[in-house]
Image (cartoon, helix red, strand yellow):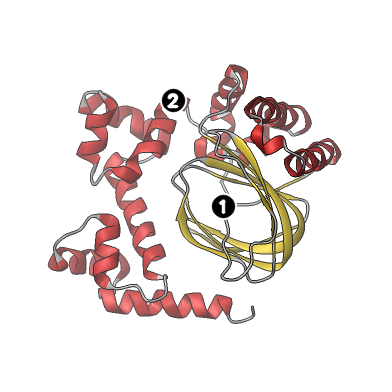
Amino acid sequence: MLFQHEEQLGYKYTTDFTTGFHYVELPSGAYEKNRILEQNAIVFIIEGSCSFSFDQYKNNLFFAGDMLFFPKSAIVSGVVLEGMKMLYMTFDTPLGISDRLYIQQQWNVIRDITYTFTPLKMNYPIGILINSLVYLMKNGGENHAELHEIKHREVFVMLRMFYTKEEFAMFFYPIIGKNFNFKNFVLENYINCYNLKELIERSDMCANVFMRKFKTEFGMSGYQWILKQMCQRIQHKASEPGVTIKDIMCEVGIQSPTHFNRICKRYFNQTPKQLIDFCQNDLHKHQAPM
């Protein structure tokens, strides 16, 4: 589930397959707080509206007809603003070899664009496909692994057929790389590693080769990227109601309060307590209209 609600989730049709489609109907006020995604997800908003935050992209508004993409290991928060119906598709990697190759081929395209967390609009063919998927999920389709696999491939074929390379590249920007398998490995594993050294050891590469590939794929050193992810996780955790300094330290694997205080001072120019107060106030400010 991408959302939860204290009293009511509405109707839910879901599957535990590695690749699968999930249909939900959610009331206004349903929310998700700082979920770290274990798989990639494409969200199709059928009715209603919501606000999503994804890593550094805060409180973006989305409406019926929007398609969103979240990469695995993304930190996602959201709240339903107007009663919503949505279908989302989860997957580890695209099932089709041609789809994986097509994503990798967009490496040359993304070098000329600046990524923004903006939706694709569902066109007529995608709309027909999504409506049929909702019907299937409501009528027993959630239990058929083969159906999920077929429709997974159909979604990627439709995206390749009916959207430009630039639109496709902007949508899947977070997972596009010169070496798709390497980028997928990093996104899948870094969240469970406390430091860069551990991630390199999991890769079975020598440090020099790993660092060279990393710089090519992410445009910065492995150390800089890991640090950036850690700071984002600190900020997201600090926004959770009732969070303590110890909770945040456990989230990012820091054991020394002195070391954590130095990190907050250096990268946020605040003490840990000041950072929590700032993030809590910012959260309440954005939630006040709801």
Front residue of 243 and 69: 243
First along the sequence among labels 1 and 2: 1
Residue appearing at x 34%, y 58% in the figure: 231
Quarter holding residue 235: bottom left
Quarter holding residue 199: top left
Amino acid bearing label 2? Asn
**Which tag is nearer the camera, tag 1 or tag 2?**
1
Q: Is residue 42 above or below residue 18?
A: below
C-alpha distance separating marks 1 and 2:
26 Å
Left or right of 201 on screen, residue 156: right
Residue appearing at x 44%, y 25% in the figure: 181
Left or right of 239 on screen, residue 173: right
Numbered circle sitting on residue 39: none
Which residue was labeled with disc 1?
Answer: 1
Across and down, in percent, residue 37 comes to: 47, 47
Numbered circle sitting on residue 181: 2
Mark 2: secondary structure: helix
Disc 1 and disc 2 in contact, CB within 8 angstroms: no
Residue appearing at x 28%, y 56% in the figure: 252
Decide if residue 179 is in sight here: no
Amino acid bearing label 1? Met
Q: Is disc 2 surrounded by few (<14), some (14 to 19) or many (20+) residues within 10 Å?
A: some
Front residue of 271 and 215: 271
Across and down, in percent, residue 58 comes to: 53, 63
Left or right of 31 on screen, residue 218: left
Decide if residue 5 is in sight here: yes
Across and down, in percent, residue 124 comes to: 86, 40
Residue appearing at x 64%, y 78% in the figure: 290
